[in-house]
Every structure is written in structure tokens, then in C-alpha cells.
Image (spheres, rainbow, N blue to C red):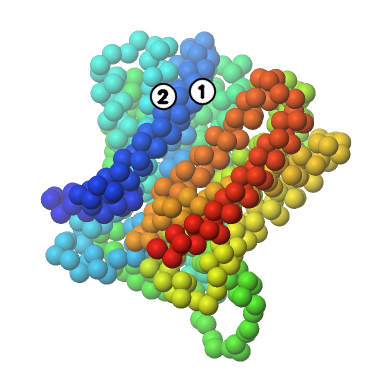
Amino acid sequence: MRKLFLLLRIDALGVLGTTRLSDPAARRKAVRALALGAFVAVCLLGTSLMYFYMMAGAFAALGTPELTLGIAAVAGALVTVLTSFVSAPNVLVAFADFDQLLSLPIPVGTVALSRLLKLVLRNLLFLCMVLVPAAVAYGLNAQVGVAFVLRFLVLALLSPLLPLAIASVLGLIIAKISMAFKRMHAVRIVLSFLLVFASLALSFSMQSIVENFDEIGAQLAQSVYAVYPPARWFADAACGSASAFALFAALNVLPFAAFSLLAARNLRALHAGLAGGAGEKRKAGAIRVSPVRRALFLREVRRYFASTIYVTNTAIGALLLIAGAIALLFVDKGRIAQEMGIPVSAFAPIVPYLAAWMLGMSTTTAASISLEGNSIDQLKVLPVSVPAVFRAKLALHFAVTLPAEIIAATLFSIALEADVMQALLLYLLPAAFSAFVGLAGLWINLLHPKLDWKNETEVVKQGFPTFVTVFGSMLLVGIPLALLLLGIMDAPILGYAFTALCALGALLIWKWLCGKGVRRFAEL
């Protein structure tokens, strides 16, 4: 048990971006990361509580307030599967120091359990953003006591086990299937995106079910629980059903325990199959000569598509933007505005900001320095300038975001029947914001790199620069969006002013990168 806690402690310090807390600088870094995480958690909890409070009131009017808990269980399970099936193989068996860790006097089962618990604890934090506000909202609309709180705490701890077992199996299957193809990484990326969009489609169908509040409560509950049947037992168990509690506990614990046992017994075989296999047999060919800029860019492209989790976590925003633009051609804009709770006249002006918000999710530069890892010294000795390296990383970011932005802006212009000024804003605002966020991500990653990562998940999904860039971009877009919806500023003036500020900010960051950024890169 002591060795298990030691492994978990090392993983926790790695998430905070440090390996020891005796160093004052390391402590300050950990405190900053925790403070930022706490701030974002409070914002997410507040938003989730507001949503579930409105939902619980509607369900209470239908006589089914416990449906709030069931929907929270469904949402939590979907989010767990959606965010874990890509990262699970990397966290469990394909991490960098696998051989070193298993060479230590630590049982293989302890290592496997520590990796599984790392997944559980990480997803439990995200589940709390959904389950805790749902429980509070339910408690405000129903009579609850201490027994409910205790039952709910146990149920919340059990909730991620079954979805994680499912996500891990799916991730390992996708990884194994992809290895049978010549283009291993391409197949894995495609399969991962198919599963992502299938999960999103399921969540959207659940949302349409929830919004139809004029149905009878029993029929609504039946429709919701059809999405994820264990959610019924979760809600019934929280309300006091002993049999539902036993069923929910068994359904989560037994599959997770079985998967844990199999993973522990086959950890070396799984690692050999996933990390040691090669989907494509390379053959020696003619040596190709490329200009420096092109060679650096192609290097970034190859690194990008060599990592499934890198692609799926950065390209999803661009793909959703294109999907949303296509959908807008066929849906009623007035209905969308009504569902969003805004005037129909305000819908078109907010579209550029929504596009910018989605592009902020597709920032590749926030992890590009960290992903160099221990090989960054090889990059530093190349006969190329540091600004050329920065330009290559920015070029990858623009290659991911700008084509999607151009396609979406064209489709938005057609769907909204935009005039010249509106169409220009649809093109310029998201593009300027994408440039600013891409440069800001590179700047933050240069200041806070993590080069000693064990698997790519630590920098792509859990890294401090990624965290700040993604959530910071959401906050930045939210400010002009709020000014627009409150009617404080004229829409065209606000849009072009925001575009100009983004362009100015991008230029200032680039100037810093070409000056102090070069020295900072040399110090890494």
C-alpha cells in the first residue's frame, strides 16, 4: 500500500508540473497551478449549478425531481467515456518510463492499479463538476437529509468505474485494430473521431429529450434512462432504494475489478502490443531535400499526426465549427435564437464569437514546446534560427484552424445572408483571434514547459499551458459576447475593435517571441 501511495504522489506532482516540493520555485509553481485550477473549477461549478437548478425546477413541476440526478449520471458517464478512451491506453500501458518503472521492486499489480487509480481520480474531479451541482439542485427542490448526502457521496465515488472500464476497453481495441493497418495512426485517429462524434450525437439526442418538458414525467424519465440504463439505479439509489444501490455498486465495481485484474496480469503484453508494435514497415528510399521552412513544418505535421490524443484534442473544435456551419444552412435561425434565450436579431452578430470560441479549442501551440520532451536538445542544435522553429509551430496551428475558419465563414455568410460588413467580420474576427490564441499558447508554453512528461496526455490534456490557453480563450471571447448581448456596444464597432485588439496582441507576442522568447528557448 505504501508503494501505491508513493506512485500516486509522484503522479500528482507530475500533474502540478513539478517532481518535488522542497524547492521554493517548485512550490510556487504548484500553488499557481492549484489556484488556477480552483478558479476554473468554481466557474464551472457555478455554471453547472445554474443549469441544473433550472432543470430541477422543471422536473419538480412534472413530479420527477430525481430525474435531475439521472441526467447528471448520464452526462457524467458520457463525458468520462468521451474524454478517456483516447488517453486510457497512453496512461495505462504506453507511458514513457514503463520499463524503468517495472524494473523497480514494485509488483506489477501495484503499478497497474496506480495507473487505473490515476484515471479514476482525474475523471472523478470532472464528474464532481456535474454530480455535485445536480445534487445541490435536487436538494433545493426535494426534502433531503444527511442520509442522502452520504449515499450520494458513495455513489459519486462509484460512478466513474464502469465508464472508465468501457473507455479503457474501447481505447485498447481501437489502438489494437489500428495496428493491423499500414497507416496505423491515421486509422486510430479516424476511429477515435468516429467514437467522439457518436458520443456527441448521443449527448445531443439526450439534450433534445431534456428540453421537451411538456411530456409526462414518466415518459421523459424512460427516454432519458434509455440512453444510459444504470442512471436509473443511480437516481433510485440516491433517493433511498437499497436494491438499486446494490445493483449500481455491483455494475460499477465488478467490471472495473475484472478489467483491473486482466490489466495487471497482462500489463507487459499490452505494452508490448501497443508500444512495441509498428503498423507501417518503413523502407529506405531516396533522400529528399526540402527548404528549411518546409522541412520544419513537415516535421511538425509528422509529430502532430503521430499522436492520436494530440489530434483528437486539438482538431475537434475546428471540426465542430465546420459541422455547425453546415447545420446552420438547414435549421431555423429563429428557433436556435429562441433556444439560446436571445433575440433573433442578436443571433447573427454573435456567430463570429462562437466561431472564435470553437477555434480556441483547437490550439496546437500550447503543447508544442512540451511535446519536444527530451529531444528538444536535438532541435536546438539544428542550423536553423529559433524564430524559424516558432514559425513552424505556428504554421501547424494555422493549418488546423484557418481552413476550417474559411470554410465555416463562407457557409455562415450564405446561411445568414450576410452583407459585406458582416461577411468581413465572419472572416476576420475568428482568424485574428486564432492568430492571437496560437501565439499566446506558444508564449505560455515557452514560459511553462513540461519536458519530463511520461505520456503525452500530461501535456496535451493536463498541461498548465493548455489549461490556461483553452479556458483563457473562452473567457476572452465571453467578454465582448457579454457586451454585445447586453447591448452596451454597437455590434459592428465591437466586432472590428475586438479584431484589431486580437491582431495587436498577436503582434506584441510575436515581438516578445523574437526577442526574449529566443533567449528563453535557449535556456530550456
- Few, some or many residues within 10 Å of mark 1 (<14, 14–19, 20+): some
- Few, some or many residues within 10 Å of mark 2 (<14, 14–19, 20+): many
Q: Tell me, for residue 133, which label it has, or none.
A: 2
Residue 393 spot, x, y in % from top left = 56, 61
Residue type, label 2: Pro
**Mark 1: which secondary structure?**
helix
Measured in 3D between alpha carbons, the distance from the residue under mark 2 to the one under mark 1, in whole angstroms, is 9 Å
Query: The C terminus is located in which quarter?
Result: bottom left
Indicate whether 273 appears above or below 422: below
**Mark 2: which secondary structure?**
helix
Indicate whether 481 appears above or below 459: above
The answer to whether residue 32 is seen in the rendering is yes
Residue drawn where x is 53% and y is 58% of the image: 515
Residue type, label 1: Tyr
Instruction: Say which of 440 and 210 sits in front.
Output: 440
Residue 180 spot, x, y in % from top left = 50, 71
Is there a contact, CB below 8 Å, between mark 2 and mark 1? yes
Q: Tell me, for residue 251, which label it has, or none.
A: none
Residue 146 spot, x, y in % from top left = 25, 16
Horizontal relation, residue 54 to residue 317: left or right: left
User: Which comes sooner in the sequence, label 2 or label 1?
Assistant: 1
Horizontal relation, residue 370 to residue 237: left or right: right
Q: Which residue is mark 1?
A: 51
Residue drawn where x is 60% and y is 63% of the image: 391
Horizontal relation, residue 237 to residue 388: left or right: left
